[in-house]
Amino acid sequence: MSYYGWKPYVPVAERRAKAEKAAAKAKKAGATLTPIAPFRGAIVKTFWGKAWCDNQEHYSDYESRLPRGRTYVRNGSVIDLQITPGEVRAQVMGSSLYAVTVSVTAVPEKQWKTICTDCSGSIDSLVELLQGKLSNAVMERICKPGTGLFPSPKEITFKCSCPDWASMCKHVAAVLYGIGARLDEQPEVLFSLRRVEAKDLVQQAEAGLKPSGKRMAPGKVLDDALLADVFGIEMAEVAPPVKPTAAKVAAKKAARPANATPRKVPLATKTAAGKKAETGKVAVPETKVATSAATPKAGTVATKRARARPAKDKG
C-alpha cells in the first residue's frame, strides 16, 4: 500500500535481499556489475575518498540531503556503479530498482593549469599522488572549494528514475557516497571523471625540480670583495696552481735513465742489520787473510839479511 503516490518503506533486510536478487539476475543476463559491497563503520578511509565526501558535505545545498544515502550505501543497495569520463551511472535498490546518472563537468583548462603550477615540484611520483602521500599545502590546494580538483554543486547534475521530487533523493545521495567509497580503491577514476590527467601534476613537479641550464648573469654574482663586506669575513688569496710546461716535462723525462729504478736507500749505505732484515740471515763481515811469514815480501828486513849472507860452497 502507498500513501499519496509514495511506495511503502522497505526494511533493510528486505531491500538487501532484493538487491542481491537483482544483481544475480543482471549477471545471468551477461551484465558486468561493479557494486559497492555492504560494510560497517566509516564509509571512506583514504585521503581521496574522504576529500570527495568532505567536499560534498561542505556545501549547504547537500548537507541536509546527503545523510539519507548513508544507510543505502552501507547496506549494499548500490548494486552497480560505473565511473566514466564526466559521468557516473549507477543502479540503486530502494522499494524498486532505480537508475541514477550523475554528470560532472570537466575541470576548466585554466583552472587545471593553475593547480599544476601551484603543486609544481611538490609531488615526487604518480604512486605517491594516488596513495595520497602529499604535503598539507598540496592537499589543501587540491581540495580548495571552487578552484580545486573536486566539483562544486554548480558543476554537478544528477537524475534518478524514482518518483521523489526533491533535487537530491536518497538514491542520488547513496551514489555520491558510493563514489567516495570507490575512490578509496581506485583514486585514479577521479581524474577520469574530471577529464584531466593525473600525470600532469607529476610532470609539472619534475619540471619544477629540473635545474636550469642558463648561466647566471655576471652582474648577479658577488665577487670576493663584496662577499667580505656583506658577511664580514676576509677572503684568503689562493694562488692558482701552476701547471708544468711541456718543455719542462720533456727535459725531466730525458734526464732520467730509461732503466733506472728509484730506490729509497742506496745499497752502499745498507748496514749488516739492514741486510739481516732483508735476507733473514746474519751478515758475516769479511776478514782479510794474513800473508804467510814463509813468503817474505821484497824490501823487508828478512830479505835484506838473506841477501847479505855469503853463499856456501856446495862441496
Image (tube, rainbow, N blue to C red):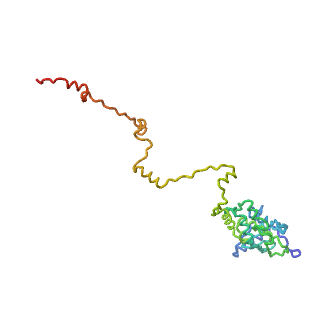
Query: Is 89 positioned to the left or the right of 250 in the image?
Result: right
Residue 314 location (% of width, % of height): 12, 24
Q: Which of these two is toward me, 263 or 118? A: 263
Q: Which of these two is toward me, 198 or 82? A: 198
Q: Quadrant of residue 201?
A: bottom right
Residue 5 to residue 282: above or below: below
Q: Quadrant of residue 144?
A: bottom right
Residue 91 location (% of width, % of height): 76, 73
Report whether residue 300 is seen: yes
Query: Is 226 positioned to the left or the right of 305 in the image?
Result: right
Q: Quadrant of residue 219?
A: bottom right
Residue 61 location (% of width, % of height): 84, 69
Please tell me how many numbered marks the rendered image carries: 0
Q: Residue furthest right?
A: 4
Residue 275 to residue 82: above or below: above
Q: Which residue occupies 68% across, 68% down?
A: 200
Query: Is 43 positioned to the left or the right of 235 in the image?
Result: right
Quadrant in which the N terminus is drawn? bottom right
Residue 211 location (% of width, % of height): 64, 62
Quadrant in which the C terminus is drawn? top left
Q: Which of these two is toward me, 13 or 189? A: 189
Q: Which residue occupies 67% across, 49% down?
A: 233
Report whether residue 71 is seen: no
Q: Which of these two is toward me, 244 or 180? A: 244
Q: Which residue occupies 81% across, 68% down?
A: 69
